[in-house]
Amino acid sequence: MNKKFFKVAAFYAFTDLLNLPTLQKTFANFLKKEDIKGTVLLAHEGINGTVAGANDGVDRFREFLKLNNLYEPQNFKTSSCAEDPFPRLKVKLKDEIVSIGNELAAPATIVGEYVQPEDWNNLISRDDVLVLDTRNTYEHSIGTFEKSIQPETTNFREFPNWLEELESSGVDKNDKVAMFCTGGIRCEKASSLMKAKGFKNIYHLQGGILNYMEKVDEEDSLWKGECFVFDDRVALNHNLEVGSYDMCHGCRMPITEADKLEEEYERGVSCPNCFNKKTPEQKKRYADRQKQVDLAKLRNEKHIGANFQSSKK
């Protein structure tokens, strides 16, 4: 008997959208019909999402996006996994498809210069280029590009404040900055904000780390570590296969096998990152949730509480 594999598609497009409630229903109906799960965000600025389903169903979804003028091949990346990474389907209407909280960021109007994965190594190897990781600290901690810096942000909405501090430091706005993120959407929006604020030489990796891993051979790669993803796979290696990290369901941070050997680790409850930050009430609630997850597994069911989902890319 052939083992079932799921195709996972991460995608986005910055484009003006109207009639969002109608579009929401159209997406939900199509995805339900194809038995595709995951999260899709719709806003007036465009679409962003990660979904998973059968190979043919995801291929039909790609055609669906094309018919609705929402498909950009460089921003539609696929991978596969043995288990469905999402427990349910969510199609949400949002103010932004990736939240930065600053109206100056408008990628449909102004954006930095796209860099193809095949050209990325040459750019970030230059001494006069600052390599900027626009992801969060915990993502950066398990893998990043050589020479990159991360602005100590734990949420993308903190990026504008960091940028204000950078401007106040007297930075030369002619300096070259090459930025990257998981799928390209955050660095595209961050590049838009920097361009709007007068930075002249802003570059960003088109399609993000996932596109780089697909297009650049591992032996030629400047990527070190694994790439965090916002679903049950937790992280991917350079072959876009499920990596070595697990996730603490208490704080949603990536954890290693070594972390699991620490006294602070309790499956489904806490890890060394969050043990001292959780109240006894929270720990009890998480323990009760884990018990329900285990019982559901014994019944060969999937408990929604077992999964980690986020709208960010």
Image (spheres, rainbow, N blue to C red):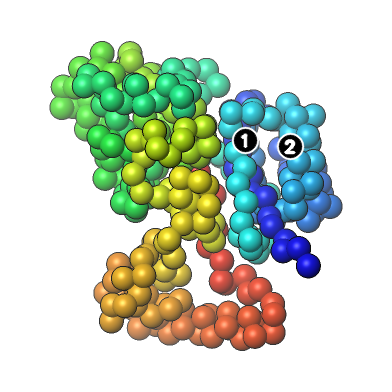
Q: Residue at x 22, y 19 (%)?
A: 128
Q: Is residue 26 visible?
A: yes
Q: Quarter of the image holding residue 156? A: top left
Residue lying farthest right?
Answer: 33
**Label 2 sits on what residue type?**
Arg
Mark pair 1, 2: CA separation: 8 Å
Q: Position of residue 201 (x, y in %)?
A: 33, 15
Q: Earlier in the sequence, mark 1 or mark 2?
A: 2
The residue nearer to you, when weighing 242 against 205, is 242
Which labelled disc corresponds to residue 76?
1
Would you say the residues marked 1 and 2 are in contact, meaning their CB atoms lie under 8 Å apart?
Answer: yes
Q: Is residue 168 left or right of residue 237?
A: left
**Label 1 sits on what residue type?**
Phe
Q: Residue at x 22, y 29 (%)?
A: 166
Q: Which residue is mark 2?
A: 62
Q: Is residue 275 left or right of residue 245?
A: left
